[in-house]
Amino acid sequence: MVASPIEIQSRLERILQRVQKPGRYVGGELNQVVKDWDSVNTRVALAFPDIYDIGLPNLGLAILYDTLNKRTDVLAERAFCPWIDMESAMRQAEIPLYSLESKRAIAEFDILGFSLPYETLYTNALNFLDLAHIPLFSVERSASDPLVIAGGHAAFNPEPMAPFIDAFVIGEGEEVIHDIVNAHQAWKASGAPRRDLLLRLAKIWGVYIPSFYEPRYNPDGTVCEIVKLEEGIPDRVAKRLVAHLPPPPTHFIVPNIDVVHNRIAIEIMRGCTRGCRFCHAGMITRPVRERTVNEIVEAIQESLDNTGFEDVALLSLSSSDYTHILELVDAVSERFEGKHLAISLPSLRIETASAELFEKLKGARQGGFTLAPEAATERMRNIINKPVSTEQLMETVRAIYSRGWSTIKLYFMIGHPAETLEDVQAIADLCKAVLREGRKLIGNRANLHAGVSTFVPKPHTPFQWVPCDTVEQIKAKQLLLKKALAGPGLKLNWTEPNSTLLEAWLSRGDRRLAQVVYSAWKRGARFDAWQDEDHYQDWMEAFAENGLDPAFYTHRRRFLDEIFPWEHINVGVTKKFLTQDYTWSLDGKTRLDCRQKCFACGILPGFAELRRQNPGDVWKCPEVSRGRVNAQAA
Ligand code: SF4
C-alpha cells in the first residue's frame, strides 16, 4: 500500500531534524504551484536526479513546470534525489520518494519525467526509481505504474538507459510534453493495455520507445544493425524542435536555502553556429533561434517582480553571438538602472566579445570574467574548430583587465585529438602570459584562474570516432600543468580522471551498458557527478561482472563506417557532414561560422518544411524555397 501524503508528512517530521539541510526536502517555496490532486486528469512528477541544490535552478525543469502547470487539466510537481544521509533515514522510516508540493508518493503520479542533462546521473535515476518503489526495468511495469520518460542532452544517446525508461524525448520538450500528456489521457480513457500507450507515443515526433528497437552486434562487439520491432514507427527517431522559442518562464521558484544558482535565467537564444568539433550541445541544438530584445527585457522585468532575485543570467551557448547583444545590454542597463542587478553573460566568444561590449557591461555588477579558448595553440584550435588567434585572445583579456575586472577565468580542455605534451605546456604558458598582461595593466590585483577539464568524445559530433585519453595520459598532462601553473595570482582546477572515464564509457555506450549501470548501482554507485563520491571500483567490478571491457567504449578509434549505438537517433546533422568535418579536422582545416556560409549540415533538408513556415530572421539558417533547399544552403 502506498503511503498517503499525511503519512509521508508525519514520518518526515520525525527524521528531518536529523539530516543536513532539511530545507531540501520540504518544498513550500515562493512560486511553487500546488493544485488540487483530484481536480486534474494528469499528474506529472518532474525529477532532476541529483540533490535539490543542483536540480532546483535547472532551466529545463523550470520550463516544463511552467508549461504543464499552465494547463488546467494537468498538475506538475517536483522531486529530487535525497542526499545520502536523507536516503538512509527515508529507507529506515519507510518513506517512499515523494513530490515536494503535495508530499504524494511518486508512484502515484501518472507520468514521471527525468531530466538527464549528463550521463553521470544514470545511477541516481535508478536509485530514484528504487526509492519511489517503481520497478526499475520498463518491462516489469504494469498499467498502474507511472509512465517513466526521460529527456535532456544525455538522452541523445539513450541506449545505456534503454531498459529503464519507457519513452525518451529526443530534443526540445516544450511542445512534445503536451503531446505525451494528451496521448496518456487518450490511452487512460481507452482502458487499453500499457503497450497501447507506448504505441501511441512511438508515433509522436521526437519520442523514442527503446523496447520497440533491438540492437544486434557483430562478433567484434560493434553494432551490426538496429532492428525495428513494430510496424508504423520511424526507422530513425527525429529530434523535436520548436520553430519559435516559446515565452520564457518568469515565475522562478525562490528557494529557502542556498542552491547553486539563485537567479533569474533567461535563454536569449538556442543553438550555435560555430561548429566547435568537440561540442555536443552545439551539434544537437541546431538551428539557432533567437528571442527579441523586447521579449527578453520584459521577461526580466516580470521575473524580478515575481521573485525579487538580484542576479540575472542571460543564457545561450554563445552569448556574444546573439545578433542584438549590444542593443540588449543597453536596453537592460537602461531599464534596470539603479536596481543593482548582477547581469551575467556566460559563454562569451573571444572573437565576438568586443571592447564595446565590455564597456557596456562595465556598469553591471559582475564577478570574474570567463573565456573559453579550449586549447592554447593555434594548431590545436584549428583541429577543434575554434580558430581564434592568440593575439585576439590577448586583446580581449587586455580589454577585460583594463575595464576593472581583476579575475579572468580561462577554460581549457586536455585530451583533444592529436594533442601533444607541447600543446599542454602551451596552456600553462598562455595562462602566465595572460596574467603578465593583467599585472602590467592593474598590478598585483590581476588574477588568472584556469579550469582544465578532459575532453570526452560525444555522440553526434565530428569527434564521435576518436579515442579518449587513458588515465595515465590524463594524469601525465595534469601533472605537467600542476607543476607549471603555480604561483601568486594563478589558480588551477581540473577534473578527476576517474570521473572523466565514467562519462566517457556512458556517453558512447550501447545498450549492453545498461546492465553495467544496474550492477554499479547495486554495488552502491550513485552521485557519480560528485568528485568526492568515487565509485570507480564499483564500476570496474560491474564491467567485469557483465563481461564487458571499458576500454572498448573509451580508448578505441572507431571505424569510419561503424554503425553507432545511436544511429537510429536523428539529430538533423547528418553523418556525412560529421564524417567530412572529422576528416577536415585531421588536416587542421576549419569551418567558418555557418551564419557566414551554410555548410549544409543536414538541418535544412531535415526541417525544410518547418523553416519554410517560419521565414525571415527567426532562424539563422538560410531560407528554403518550395521544393528544395535554397541554393545558398546546398
Ligand atoms: S543548415 Fe547551414 S546554417 Fe543551418 S545549422 Fe546547418 S550549416 Fe548552419
Image (spheres, rainbow, N blue to C red):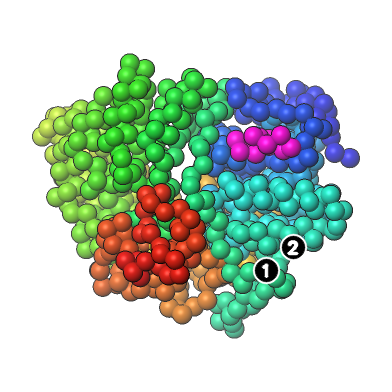
In the image, is residue 450 above or below residue 536?
above
- Amino acid type at circle 1 is Ile
Q: Give the range drawn in magenta.
A: 65-82
Q: Is residue 127 left or right of residue 529?
A: right
Q: Which residue is drawn at 16% across and 45% down?
A: 394
In the image, is residue 593 above or below residue 294?
below
Quadrant, the N terminus: top right
Find disc 1 in the rendering and name its residue: 233
- Amino acid type at circle 2 is Leu
**Inter-mark Cα distance, 1 to 2:** 8 Å
From the viewer's side, name the closer residue of 375 and 547.
375
Q: Is residue 437 left or right of residue 275?
A: left
From the viewer's side, name the closer residue of 215 and 41.
41
Ligand 1 is in which quadrant of the figure?
bottom left
Badge 1: how crowded within 10 Å, few (<14), some, or many (20+)?
some
Secondary structure of the residue carrying tag 2 is: helix
The single residue placed furthest to the front in the displayed view is: 626
The single residue placed furthest to the right in the displayed view is: 1
Q: Answer yes or no: is residue 269 visible.
A: yes
* Disc nearer the start of the sequence (1/2): 2
